[in-house]
Image (tube, coloured by chain):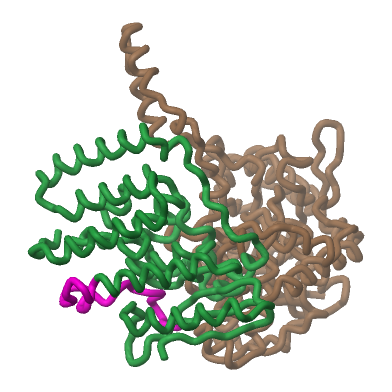
Amino acid sequence: MLYIYQCTRTAFTKMGGAMDHLNAADIGKSAVSSLLTNAAIDPALIDEVIMGCVCQPADSANIARVIALRSGIPESVTAATVHRNCASGMEAITTAYERMHADHGQLFVVGGCESMSNTPVLYRKSAVQKFAKLARARSPLAKLTAALQFRPKDFNPLIGLRLGLTDPFTGINMGQTAEILAREYEISRVEQDAFAVNSHNKALNYQQSLNQEISPVYTRGKAIDSDDGIRADSSVEKLANLKPVFEKNTGSVTAGNSSQITDGAAVLLVGSIRMKELGLEPVGRLRGYAYAGCDPSRMGLGPLFAMQKLFKETGFSLAQADIIEINEAFAAQALACIKLSDSEVLAKKAGLDSKLGEIPLDKLNRRGGAIALGHPVGATGARLVLTALDQLRESQQQHALTTLCIGGGQGAALWIERLT
Amino acid sequence: MHLKLETHGTIAHLIFDRKDSSANIFDRDVLAELDQQLDGIPKCSKLTALIISSNKPNIFIAGADLKILSTATGEELENLISLGQSVFSKLESLHITTIAAIHGACVGGGLELALACDYRVVSEAQCSRIGLPETQLGILPAWGGSTRLPALIGLSKALPLILSGKIMKPKLALRKGIVDGICPQQHLISYASSFANRQMRQLPVHMLEHNPLTVSLIRKQAQDSLYKKTRGLYPALNRAVDVVCTGVRVSKQESFDNEREAIIELSQAPKQPN
């Protein structure tokens, strides 16, 4: 079984905000350094660093290795980057579990990092070909001819972030998948806005607890030590004024009831029970996990399919969970999961075997979710596990279920247990 | 009974649902029934808008009944075309805002009906298609399509669409300016209702395109490129250029007369479907 010994994260800051000038490797490095400082162990004892990152920067191929070396982990320790879209942070944790069970190591640094501020803006293929021609041209005349080939549309860039948030198989944007759920399961704009306001309010109430999850990032003479997406002035009336982003005419998904685009990293020190010998004290353990596939155009229902698989394989049930963390990619998506989970008819319509049970709102995302805190795609999976563990510690409860939807039509669910 | 008229508050909702058929098409009965329904609307003073939609799963209105078109004699055909023109003109001249809520195929006469409305909204569903394919059948749009399409989007955009008979997906129709908005099927009627408060549409003037000089240039260019493609073998295309280009310079009624004259002539010629 995989034991969790330490965990921490950076603050989650809005795109273009406080960590705009740091790339994903910088943010990840800061988180890993803090983790190692807190754990107070010899970095050479680590067997591997496994990091999730969705928009992997072009200048840090295998970003996990870059982070490992820059955090002072010795060259001999290996590092691998994993990618399962929004669940990349969870993928890092479960990869460590699998490595451990294949006898490839006992102690791992895992997690996820993302700098959505620094997702690239790309040249089109047509422009790239013309640049190549220009570079090959030798004589001044040839250079001029090549330069004259450029047309204004060659300089109309491709937005990396938009491409990344569009599912190439169905051609629809993540926000549109949420619109589909809102339509099919009749989730109104007001419900979505109320859910979003609630997320901000919860985060506001638990801001002190949230700050305990965070290790500061020191940059430009300042410490970035708190999440900056939480709004104290959010209200259903204010959110009602926002225009739908993805379906301009008749949609209900707005910037206000979707997760924020954010930079951040979350990391955990995990390993086998034998690591107690190093003086480490486990705070929790991974009791089971499942990934499940579903319709890419309704990817928001992924958590339900993953939960169904997890419950079937482990025998756990929704009622046993003391804490439930469902990532709030979109309010419509999270509400659809809540609604379908407790309705036999709707669950069957969506393709589940049967309903999963009620998701009690007082157990759900107690410290707010991605609508308030942000969703740095690679890091969120790890943050959910981290916050669940910290909530279990705070409330002295035992079991937590963490789950999220994955772009491209998957869901992930991890069952976490607190150790005393 | 192929039509159903419902009233919700100040909005009337006219639903096409042809009896015992999977498609909505126009024949004499349907046109007569539509005429009758439209007559009733001015009497209802509280109405502010009329939404037209279809109850068929994949079809808005597929156009005229081709069997009748191909078998009708000269006089019958003339009556049918005149009836269609007058009914669509009646729809156009209603004192309230009219909106076509299109889901499914809206082609030929279906689009000509929609063009007689002030606004057109279309569902983003796969089955939604919009176009005037008449010239591909050796005839031309004669229920006002050859007149109203150029009046809406301008001659330079309308003529190629009529000559090619292109059937468009909603997004392209939106780019061309033929429809005013796209939305998911579930929201179609509520979105159409959001147009109810708008004023009746004032058509653009298209001064740059519809002046005598530009029209004659466009006509010349179209004729030349047609000749290159067809060597003058497809009379429907040439007549369509003629009717459409003349149409933007003369009154609506004159243009309707041209349309009617042309379709009768073309239907009586030996058939040459392209």
Q: Colour of chain A?
A: brown
Q: Is residue A9 visible?
A: yes
Q: Residue at x 61, y 84 (%)?
A: B7
Farthest residue to the top: give it.
A140
Residue drawn at 74 percent across, 43 percent down: A30
Q: Quadrant of the C terminus of chain A?
A: bottom right
The chain that appears green in the image is B
Q: Position of residue B106 (x, y in %)?
A: 38, 69
Residue A269 x/y as whole percent: 70, 58
**A237 and B257: which is toward the camera:** B257
Report the side of A351 relative to B27 (left or right): right
Q: Nearer the viewer, residue A85 or B118?
A: B118
Residues in magenta? B55-77
The answer to whether residue A100 is visible is no
- Is B230 part of what is drawn in magenta? no
Q: Is residue B69 magenta?
A: yes
User: Measured from the top left, where is residue B235 in percent x and y?
Assistant: 15, 53
Q: Nearer the viewer, residue B155 or A63?
A: B155
Determine which quarter of the picture holds residue B57.
Answer: bottom left
Q: Tell me if residue A316 comes above or below residue A164 in the rendering.
A: below
Seen at 87% across and 66% down, the residue is A201
The quadrant in which residue B98 appears is: bottom right
**Residue A303 image position (x, y, % from top left):** 60, 75
Residue A110, located in which quarter of the rendered image? bottom right
